[in-house]
Amino acid sequence: MSDEDQDICGLCGQPGADKFAHPIHWPGERTPDSDLVHEECEDKECRRAHSLLSDKERERFLRAI
């Protein structure tokens, strides 16, 4: 596997991933297909999933982790 293949973002599929994906995800958050992601892609997906949850759902999830 070349270096170029190893930096593919597990969320968008584009090269240049700059961080390891966070291991915990909001309910409904799309999980990456690989260990690496672009910080921007991960932030965007996290915000999207977070915005779909009610305050009660967020609190319940946070208490469970």
Image (cartoon, rainbow, N blue to C red):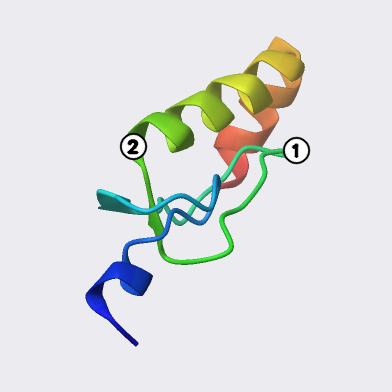
Q: Which mark is residue 28?
A: 1
Point out residue 10 in the picture as x, y percentages from the top left corner. Answer: 51, 56
Earlier sequence position, callout 2 versus callout 1: 1
What's the amino acid at mark 1? Gly
Residue type, mark 2 in image: Glu
- Residue at the spot of label 2: 39
Question: Which residue is at a point 41% across and 60% down the rendered structure image?
Answer: 8
Q: Which disc is residue 62 wearing?
A: none
Give the residue displayed 75% in from the left and 18% down from the top: 52
Q: Dot 2: within a 10 Å radius of its alpha carbon, few (fewer than 14), some, or many (20 or more) residues?
A: some
Report the quarter where the N terminus lies: bottom left
Apparent side of residue 8 relative to residue 30 in the rendered image (left or right): left
Q: Taking 16 as reference, is 60 left or right? A: right
- How far across and down, in percent of the image, does residue 49 sit? 67, 27
**Front tag of 2 and 1:** 2
4, above or below 63, in the image: below
Query: Residue 46: x percent and y percent?
Result: 54, 30
SS class of the residue under badge 2? helix
Contact? badges 2 and 1 (CB < 8 Å): no
Q: Quadrant of residue 27?
A: top right
